Structure formats: structure tokens, C-alpha cells
Amino acid sequence: MNQKPFIALDFPTWEKTSIFLDHFSESLNVKVGMELYLQNGPIIIEKILNKNHRIFLDLKLHDIPNTVYGAMKGLAGLDLDLINVHAAGGSVMMEKALEGLQAGTPANHSPAKLIAVTQLTSTTEEQMQREQLIPKTINESVLHYATLAKEAGLDGVVCSPHESSLIKEYCGEDFIRVTPGIRLTNDQKGDQKRVTTPRMAREMGSSFIVVGRSITGASNPVEAYERIVQEWEGLE
Ligand code: C5P
């Protein structure tokens, strides 16, 4: 898999998505999340693949193991590069997600990489302690979830760049760290709390970055994307 940034296609319709994608002449890594997928269904994946882009399907599955198994088995037929679950669903749920993914992947394809969301990048340590009743630091919670995900056989995690180096140290270089919460220096944070720039994410050990509003909300999305790629690749 190439390491280009994943652009979060947080749009409600195919029309808006297609207008956005048509700004770009190259093949992209894109992330389809619940806003786009739940309002348009699996056909959206086919339409994006027809434009030659690679897809991270970010539905963050979190349910009982049997339900996640069935959902993952169905999604496995969609020709995705990356897919995810919430680590908070537990070890058995993650193991069943992996089994479902393997069972549903067509014989001539390799399964999508399966990763687990640790703590959302919109969650602060104080919120986590107060609302989830976890009396630990956010680093400890994220590392704990990463360890569970690795033990369950998953390929990596979604975390903030602030936790990437710790996860790399404990779970190994090959255990991938996908990091949202990326902003260029002067961009609005929005609802994100644990943010960094693309350059910082690279220095902190992220394997992939996910960028939404800094590109989709820019007056010139292609220029914003190119600036992010340059910072991420260390050319700037
Ligand atoms: O617009 P922005 O760059 O904040 O978008 C980040 C994207 O990454 C969103 O689509 C969001 O759903 C997703 N995401 C996240 N934090 C996670 C997992 C996914 O922000 N832990």
C-alpha cells in the first residue's frame, strides 16, 4: 500500500463527492466514513473504485462479536484497502471481526488491513477519565487498546500522532499507526482535540495520516492536498 495521506470524504452525497474528486487527476487514498456510507450504501464504494482510488472504510464497528463477524464478512467483498472496528468492543469482537473479514474475502483477493480505533482524536484525557471512568493517562489507555488489537491479530490501530511512537515501540514498526487529527499550522481544529501537523505526525511515527477538513474545506483543495503531501513526505 502506498503511504499517501487518506482524504476523509465526509460528504453526504455522491454528487458532492464526485465534484470534489474531479478536482484531482491522480489516483488518491480516500477514507469513506459513516456520513457518506450510511446515506449512500455500498454502491458508493463501487463508484469511488471506478475512479481508481483506494479506500479506507471507516465505519468503526462496535457490537457483539457475532454481529461484527457477519457485518465484516459482508464488507469484505467490497475490495477495500483498510477497514476498522472499535478496540473498546473487546478482544473477542476483534478476533471475530478478523475471522469475518477472512471468510468474506474473495479467493483471488488479499483481505483489507484490519485496524482498531483506540481513543478518538476528539477525546481529551480529562473526558476519557470522567466519562469512560478510565483512571489512567490517555497514553496508557491507547497503548492498552493497541496491545489488545495486536494480540487479536489485527494489523494496526487508529490513534493520534501523539501516541504513535509509543505504539511503534511496544507493538513494532509493522503494526500500523493511522492518525487523524491532522491540521496545517493555521487551520481550524474544529472538534478535534489531539491534533498535529503532517510533519509532526511523520516525526512522531505515524504510518498513514487521515486529513479531512483541511483539504475538503480549503478554497483550493488540490493545493491544500499538495502542501500536506509535501510536509508529510518531508519535502518542505
Ligand atoms: O476533518 P478532519 O481532518 O478532522 O477529519 C478526520 C476524519 O478522521 C473524520 O472522518 C473522522 O471521522 C475520522 N477519525 C477521527 N478520529 C478517529 C478515527 C477517525 O477523526 N479516532
Image (cartoon, grey):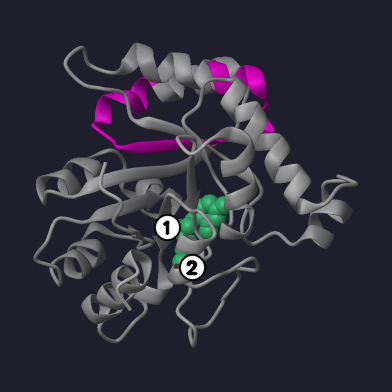
Mark 2: C-beta under 8 Å from nearest atom of ligand 1:
yes
Q: Residue at x 61, y 21 (%)?
A: 151
Sequence-wise, the earlier of marks 1 and 2 is 2
**Residue 42, x across and y down, in percent:** 28, 38
Instruction: Kindly indicate the quadrant of the structure image that contains residue 90.
Output: top right
Q: Is residue 162 magenta?
A: no
Callout 2 amino acid: Ile
Residue that numbered label 1 is attached to: 209
In the rendered structure, the answer to whether residue 47 lies left or right of residue 39 reads left
Residue 146 versus residue 73: which sits nearer the camera? 146
Residue 188 x, y percent position in the rendering: 52, 82
Q: CA distance from mark 1 to mark 2?
A: 7 Å
Is residue 94 part of the magenta span, yes or no? yes
In the image, residue 57 sits, relative to residue 186, either above or below, namely: above
Q: Secondary structure at mark 1?
A: strand
Q: Is residue 103 left or right of residue 164?
A: left
The residue lying toward the viewer, choosing from 11 and 28, is 28
- Disc 2 marks which residue? 182
Q: Are marks 1 and 2 in contact (CB under 8 Å)?
A: yes
